DNA sequence: CTTCCTTCGTTGAATTTTCAACATACAATA
DNA sequence: TATTGTATGTTGAAAATTCAACGAAGGAAG
């Protein structure tokens, strides 16, 4: 386990826990390690949802396949990040998404029940872990909430403005970089890429923003409230 | 407090807790009561998010107001249901929505910190409450996730079919009632009501479903995978 | 039974989005 | 510097959505 210490201490599940206590805790949490090769299925739809996964190396993708067989990538999970916690903590019981290795990766599984029930030796860090897990779930909730607000808008322009104003608020500045290229932004907003480009062009003509690649600056004085 | 016992035992925060223990626990949780009149602001954007609210009588609405002043109702909270838990458990620190009394109501506030840190007398039910809160957050997460899947689809027809297939799955039957009228369903899906009606008519002509008011029956044999 | 009111379906015009195709800009690298 | 590949912008036609308006259906109440 020790070789992954550097990653584990970055994991938000262990924030606030002293470095020296992380490795000893893993026992209480029923931690186990497993390696997966590229494209291998880590968890699949319908399988029991008892474990929280932590990506140690490589990366995994959360894949949703709808009734008509359309795949969509719900999220990409990078080293030190978690997956499966929503299902393990909910009353769903089983996974409703697939988790696939995007490349060869090492995964640590933690038994969610062991996180929630404090361990027999009543380790004092347990409480912090529960607190952290709660934070993670609640923060993900906020992110979903924001996304729903944005994509509930009816037009490309409204979605775009809602997104940019939200980013400006997040950065506390009217000038910021976004983490998406055009196609990714279009996918995030649920609109057509070319239509998005057109709308950006119009907004610039109206002097409501200036942009270049993924750097944006909102000209709030020209944006009607 | 005792007069609200009947409601509290319905509250999912207390599920799995023996009836006789609910009232005694409220002390550990820093519970307090307050009455609000219709339209009164219970929590507002920017106010500190330290408390979880439980609706005891009446109802409250979660209101989101965007940059342009458009109001939208995020949720209606009925007796025995919770509000504010996402904000109190996240690292947001402050509310980013308003909570308004939809009618005169009695609200119980619980100190979220006292839920998360086990109490000095180490009450044994504390763990169950934390477990329940985690469930509530994770389940809400799943609900949001489902909603995002649905409204991310591009066309009215796709959104509608995704919604109906999801409902069928939830009911374990191709025949079910939905909890929305047409306007509400249109708002949920983020589409135009008349366009939604048109699409329903088309699907019926294609013999893919039959419906009447809010009763629906999917004819899966005619729905192409 | 009639009236009132709400919900739902229908229609056509206006608007918006999507789609496909291509032009241009930009970055990496040989 | 020349080349190549990717990202972005632009355009026009087709498709879908929205909008406004109205008519029909169904319930509730007198």
Image (spheres, coloured by chain):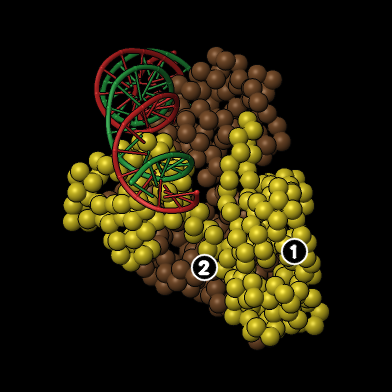
Chain colours: A brown, B yellow, C green, D red
Q: Position of residue B90 (x, y in %)?
A: 67, 56
Mark linked to residue A90: 2
Dot 2 alpha-carbon crowd within 10 angstroms: few under 14, some 14 to 19, many 20 or more: many
Q: Is residue B83 visible?
A: yes
Q: Secondary structure at mark 1?
A: strand
Q: Secondary structure at mark 2?
A: loop
Q: Position of residue A129 (x, y in %)?
A: 66, 69
Q: Is residue A7 visible?
A: no
- In the image, residue A224 above or below residue B27: above
How far apart are labels 1 and 2 at the CA level? 24 Å
Q: Position of residue B138 (x, y in %)?
A: 55, 63
Subunit of mark 2?
Answer: A
Residue at the limit of the structure toward the right, as seen here: B120
- In the image, residue B32 above or below residue B74: below
Mark linked to residue B20: none
Q: Quadrant of the N terminus of chain B?
A: bottom right
Residue A12, quarter of picture: bottom right
Residue B79, quarter of picture: bottom right
The residue located at (55%, 14%) in the rendering is A205
| Left or right: residue B150 compared with residue B205 | right
Dot 1 alpha-carbon crowd within 10 angstroms: few under 14, some 14 to 19, many 20 or more: many
Whether marks 1 and 2 lie on the same chain = no
The residue located at (67%, 66%) in the rendering is B56
The residue located at (65%, 26%) in the rendering is A225
A123 or A58: which is nearer to us?
A: A123
Residue B169, quarter of picture: bottom left
Q: Nearer the viewer, mark 1 or mark 2?
A: 1
- Residue annotated with mark 1: B109
The residue located at (65%, 51%) in the rendering is B102
B88 or A128: which is nearer to us?
A: B88
Q: Position of residue B178 (x, y in %)?
A: 40, 56
């Amino acid at each position: 386990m020790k070789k992954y210490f550097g990653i584990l201490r970055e994991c938000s599940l262990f924030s606030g826990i002293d470095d020296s206590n992380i490795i000893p805790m893993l026992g209480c949490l029923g931690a186990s390690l497993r390696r997966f090769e590229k494209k291998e299925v880590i968890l699949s739809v319908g399988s029991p949802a008892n474990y929280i996964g932590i990506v140690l190396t490589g990366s995994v993708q959360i894949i949703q396949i709808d009734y008509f067989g359309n795949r969509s990538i719900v999220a990409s999970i990078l080293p030190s990040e978690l997956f499966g916690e929503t299902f393990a903590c909910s009353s769903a019981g089983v996974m409703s998404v697939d988790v696939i290795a995007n490349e060869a990766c090492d995964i640590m599984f933690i038994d969610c029940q062991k996180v929630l029930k404090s361990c027999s030796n009543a380790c004092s860090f347990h409480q912090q872990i529960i607190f952290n897990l709660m934070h993670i779930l609640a923060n993900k909730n906020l992110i979903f909430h924001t996304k729903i607000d944005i994509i509930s808008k009816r037009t490309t322009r409204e979605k775009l403005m809602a997104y940019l104003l939200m980013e400006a608020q997040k950065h506390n500045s009217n000038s910021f970089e976004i983490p998406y290229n055009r196609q990714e932004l279009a996918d995030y907003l649920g609109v057509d890429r070319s239509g998005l480009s057109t709308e950006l062009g119009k907004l610039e003509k109206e002097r409501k923003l200036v942009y270049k690649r993924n750097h944006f600056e909102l000209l709030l004085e020209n944006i009607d409230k």
